[in-house]
Image (spheres, helix red, strand yellow):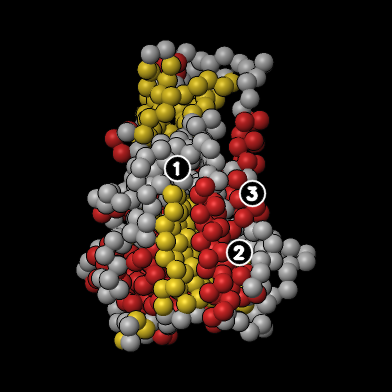
Amino acid sequence: MTSRLRAACGAALFLALAWPAQAQQVAQDATPAVTPTRLEAALPQLDAMAARAVAEGQVPGLALVVVHRDKVVFLKGYGRREAGKPGVVDADTVFQLASFSKPISATVVAALVGEKVLDWDSTVASLDPSFQLMGAYPSQQVSVRDLFAHRSGLPGEAGNELEALGFEREAILHRLRLVPPSSSFRAGYSYSNFGLTAGAVAAAAPTGKSWEEVAQEKLYAPLGMASTSSRHADFITHENRAALHIGGPGHWAATLARQPDAQAPAGGVSSTVRDLAQWMRLELANGMFDGRRLIPEAALEATHQPLMTRGANPVTGAPSFYGLGWVVEFGRHGVSWGHAGAFSVGARTLVTLYPEAELGIVVLTNAFPTGVPEGLAAQFFDLAFDGTPEKDWMGPWNAAYAGMFAPAMEAARARFAPRADALPAAPLAAYEGRYANDYVGVAEVASVGAGLELRLGPEGKARFPLTHFNRDIFLYYPTPETPDVPSAASFTLGAEGVAGALTLEDFGPSGLGRLERE
């Protein structure tokens, strides 16, 4: 995915938005009023709305669960696991959660904090001395809290582009030390998958076990979440699993896959609504589960504290903050804890909890782009709290996600539209060769047939045909889900007419994409 498109998707959540001039009135002073009568009336309407979303083709399939006062009050699946195939979605269908993984991982770390394996303010250097950021001070001072709150200074895209090329977690985390910060340490919010991953891996380090083992032992097993895992290999063993879909209503197709193990704490959890109901119960009960305390209240409560401002929710206008793996908002029904997840190759997920009302919902879908999770949740909460919807939320949320890539896509297409005055390329041999830097690694440019091919990643397995654009600028298409949106590969030729450097625009403006000829 190009850097601009990755920024547009981000976590698929309204990142770093400006406060609107007239944000809606915060409803935090209102007393939650989810009465049994209202909830009983809301659930059949939620059922009908979910069924209608699938029947209208807004998503191929979805599953949802509602928890209230420590009880599962609604649990159901709808539609197909894969469009055009007979397998149906039910409460035990396993979905990839994408960034919904973050609050789950925060719960795992809270369990470790509760056991005094570490503290939220433990420095990463004390837990994993091999990890570094750019600069001695942040490298020594950055804490697990900093990384889970996205305030380390790491740019949001750091590491994502390496993951897309096939690099594994260890290599990506090691290379973060080369990334210039996007803000001063602890001064800005920048949503970083690999920053949070670094925090989670460091938290697990004192146990001598992998993150995946720790998540299983500290959370999934104690809650009986038998179908939940932080390993992609476990996800694909389930026959009852949801495929990823792109294409939009009427055109959904399961054409792409996503293997997120490199960022498992940030985006690699897979689960079912049945399993996630147990985790919601734990969260809403402040660490209690089935009458026993699994996580000390203080350790878990820390994850829900608003630490970094994110501006305003782009649809509701509610003031939005980030805690530790959780989005904390102050909206029309009071304070909520939540997180959305998105893989632009075909997944949308959501959790929203209202702690004062002891009410929560999870919506899992197998498509992107869609605002169905937020639309269903917003409609349901209006019904549960007020007895009637404030408005039709599905339309605004669908529009928000449908338009997420549009500006970046339009800008790329306009910028790289064919030029009548384009200058010819040098002989292709001038560009062939190996280029490298410490962040990207090796990039090989080789002749294939009558053209050039760019080879990136471990062993050059990520391969992209290069299309000439103008003089020494070529285009390649790094994003499978937007195959018609190009990124530039620009060569710098020396006096002898041979390229001495290659700049890959996909790696952003910080200089990390400039590679010198070996």
Secondary structure under badge 1? loop
| Residue receiving disc 2 | 379
For badge 3, the amino acid type reads Ala
Q: Nearer the viewer, mark 1 or mark 2?
A: 2
For badge 1, the amino acid type reads His
Q: Residue at x 64, y 59 (%)?
A: 393
Q: CA distance from mark 2 to mark 3?
A: 16 Å
Residue 367, horizontal then vertical, whole percent = 47, 47
Q: CA distance from mark 1 to mark 3?
A: 18 Å
Mark before the other along the chain sequence, 1 or 3: 1
Q: Please tell me in which quadrant of the rendered image residue 190 appears.
A: bottom right
Residue 453, horizontal then vertical, whole percent = 40, 24
Q: Which circle marks residue 511 in the picture?
A: none
97 is higher (above) or lower (below) than 257: below
Residue projecting furthest to the right: 21
Discs 1, 3 touching: Cβ within 8 Å: no
For badge 2, the amino acid type reads Gln
Q: Residue at x 43, y 34 (%)?
A: 516
